[in-house]
Amino acid sequence: MNKKYKKALILLNMGGARNKDELKTFLSNMFQDENIVDIKSGFLRYLLSRFIVYRRLNIAWENYKQIDNKSPINDLTKQLVKKLEDTFEDVYIDQVMRYTPPFANECIKKLKDKGIKDIVLLPLYPQYSTTTTKSSIEDFLKVAKEEFNIQTIEEFYENSTFNDALIEEITNKNLDFEEYNLIFSAHGLPQKIINKGDPYQKQIISHVEILSKKLKDKNIKFMSTNLAYQSKIGPLKWLEPSLEDMLKNFKDKKILIYPISFIIDNAETYFELSIEYKEIAKNLGIIDYQVCSCVNSSNKFIEFIKEIIR
């Protein structure tokens, strides 16, 4: 007998490679996304993506080799899905990735097979950006073709329960926080995307202010609290300060990084933050450099999800 569900909760994210072929798929799909590459011609975006894959694939794969040849995002998202399945009896849980499997068409076929019409889309990005939230929602809606009743949750960085989950990940480090400088590290964007009205930067700044107040209210004191942006590529002007420039301020100091724009740990937290920037920090004379985990499938994050889909 098929289980009856009242609705579905679909988690949306960018995706991550599990092998070199999937890394090629990831890069190709990302650089053909018109929300990422501001070129109207789909053919020109295709040509650009081919060029970028040719130039970057082998270099990027060398990085993946340092994190067991795969992004952690897939296994960690499966853990979140399983935990949510154990939490909700009458809500169907699934995930859709934007640039690597599982894709939207696979999920929508399962929803149709189960006769589910009501869907809540939860993009796993706390702050709204055209490059993440908008891209993932549009991708799903394009395949869904108005055949479902869809509710979207577009940003949630102001939610108190969610922010408690973030604070919990920080305090889980169990450090003498007064000896550390906290840096909220956000994924960077080209400045021209912000100039076109993308609210991401304003929401990141607001989120840091909210978390700083929450830390203060809980009497958790750092030497300093800072915001920086990671992942710059190419010659364009990106959001500043860059994380690398920010780290230059802390020679002979201790640093704790929180990846504020991610919900699930991924290649950018496991490799870029935990390996690449750690080496930069060491070369700059930083005496201790630590990175917090994302909320992943923490109990507090599950509590937040229960709250928003009631």
Image: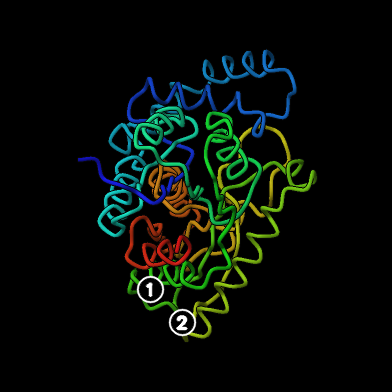
Q: Residue at x 56, y 33 (%)?
A: 139
Q: Quadrant of residue 62?
A: top left
Q: CA distance from mark 1 to mark 2?
A: 8 Å
In the rendered image of this protein, does residue 298 appear above or below residue 222? above
In the rendered image of this protein, does residue 118 appear above or below residue 68? below
Residue that badge 2 annotates: 220
Q: Which of 64/115 is in front?
A: 115
Q: Amino acid at mark 2?
A: Ile
Residue that badge 1 annotates: 171
The circle drawn on residue 179 is none
Question: Residue farthest to the left?
Answer: 1
Q: Quadrant of residue 237?
A: top right
Whether pointer 1 and pointer 2 mark residues with C-beta atoms closer than 8 Å, the reply is yes
Q: Which of 159/261 is in front?
A: 159
Q: Position of residue 134 (x, y in %)?
A: 62, 42
Q: Amino acid at mark 1?
A: Thr
